[in-house]
Image: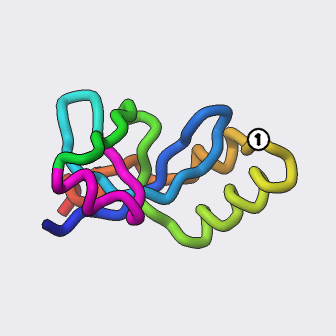
Amino acid sequence: MAHIEAMARAFRGEPWRCLVVEMATRVAYLTSSEHVEDVEAGRLDPVGFPLEDIFEFDPTLFDRLRSQWERERRTDEQLWRSAVPFGSRRAAA
């Protein structure tokens, strides 16, 4: 099964590169590429995230957020505001 790559704002703003496994009304269920087979086989549950913390994957923005996180153990809310909410590109198409 194909999953869509995304980025999520985790605890304290840590950026997480992830895959969207399932969508619900206000939550998306995510996993990492390393665990997708275990999730699909039912050996591991995906993690639920509120939709407002999930964004379209942007490699440049992700690298900036990740670098900031590694340096400061926090990320700037202003950077996150430039992220495109997950699903908005597909909804506009």
Instruction: Tell me residue 88's x, y (percent).
Output: 30, 51
Classify 75 as above or below 24.
Answer: below
Q: Position of residue 52 (x, y in %)?
A: 42, 34
- Where's residue 16, x and y in %? 53, 52
Give residue 43's position: percent from left, percent from top. 24, 47
- Residue at image x 80%, y 43%? 73
Name the side, left or right, on which 2 lies relative to 9. left
Q: Quadrant of residue 32?
A: bottom left
Which amino acid type is marked by label 1? Arg
Q: Is residue 45 magenta?
A: no
> Furthest-left residue in view?
1
Give the crowd class for mark 1: few <14, some 14-19, many >=20 residues within 10 Å. some
User: Is 32 one of the magenta-colored residues?
Assistant: yes
Residue displayed at 66% across by 67% down:
63
Numbered range of the magenta stretch: 29-41
* Position of residue 85 in the picture relative to residue 83 (left or right): left
| Quarter of the C terminus within the rendering | bottom left
**Which quadrant would the N terminus be assigned to in this image?**
bottom left
Of residues 38 and 86, the one nearer the viewer is 38
From the viewer's perspective, tell me whether residue 74 is left or right of residue 13.
right
- Relative to 3, say whether 39 is above or below: above
Residue visible at 54% across and 71% down in the picture: 59
Q: Residue at x 29, y 32 (%)?
A: 27
The number of numbered badges drawn on the structure is 1
Pick the front one: 20 or 91: 20
> Which residue is the extreme one toward the right?
71
Instruction: Give the residue number, with chain letter if any, for mark 1.
Output: 74
Q: Quadrant of residue 49?
A: top left
Q: Colour mode?
A: rainbow
- SS at badge 1: loop
Q: Nearer the viewer, residue 6 or 80?
A: 6
